[in-house]
Image (tube, rainbow, N blue to C red):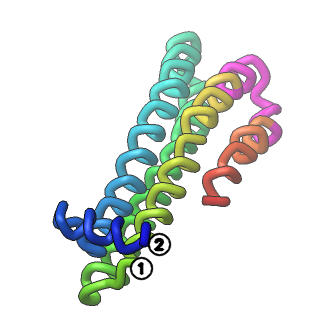
Amino acid sequence: MAYELSLDLLSALQITPNVLAAAGAAFAVSIAGISSARGLELAGHAAAGVTSEDEKNFVNGLLLQGLPQTQSIYGLLIGLLILYFGIFQGELSMEQGYIALAAGVLVGITGISAVSQGAVAASSIGAVAHNPALRAKVLIFVVIVEIEALFG
């Protein structure tokens, strides 16, 4: 009964399975993208600061600052996969629409890890500026945060 009621409500609102899938793609791209931008901002401030102190810090700062960008790539990739294998292949069933929506939301939420990754990258940029021999070690700290996004 509740399932039939929800289908009636969805059809009254003209929410089709393809609309659900499109919303999933939008969630994946937008949440991961906004989170990556915030992570890049955090790391970018640190990179700019250490580069202003010594231009030799530019390459290390750039390498570490770019890592939070990967979550937006995951969001874009999943969004495109939802669109290609879902919407562009024809009409989906309601179950497929819900699955696509859930997949997009999951990837978007795990993409929020980019903010934390940016904070770790900012600290790592400062550490490498003081001791360049730490680059490989602090890179591990930054990549560990990335694993959360990979789980999505």
Q: Residues within 10 Å of mark 1 (few under 14, many from 20)?
A: some
The residue shown at (53%, 14%) is 49
Left or right: 137 with respect to 57? right
Q: Which residues are magenta?
A: 124-137
Labelled pair 2, 1 in contact (Cβ < 8 Å): yes
Return the residue at label 1.
96
Q: x, y percentage for residue 71? A: 51, 50
Return the residue at label 2.
99
Q: Is residue 94 visible?
A: yes
Determine the image quadrant of residue 25. Answer: bottom left
Q: Residues within 10 Å of mark 2 (few under 14, many from 20)?
A: some
Magenta stretch: dominant SS?
Answer: helix
Q: x, y percentage for residue 48? A: 49, 19
- Seen in the picture, residue 130 relative to 7 is either above or below; the reply is above
- Seen in the picture, residue 41 relative to 142 is either above or below; the reply is above
Q: Is residue 77 visible?
A: no
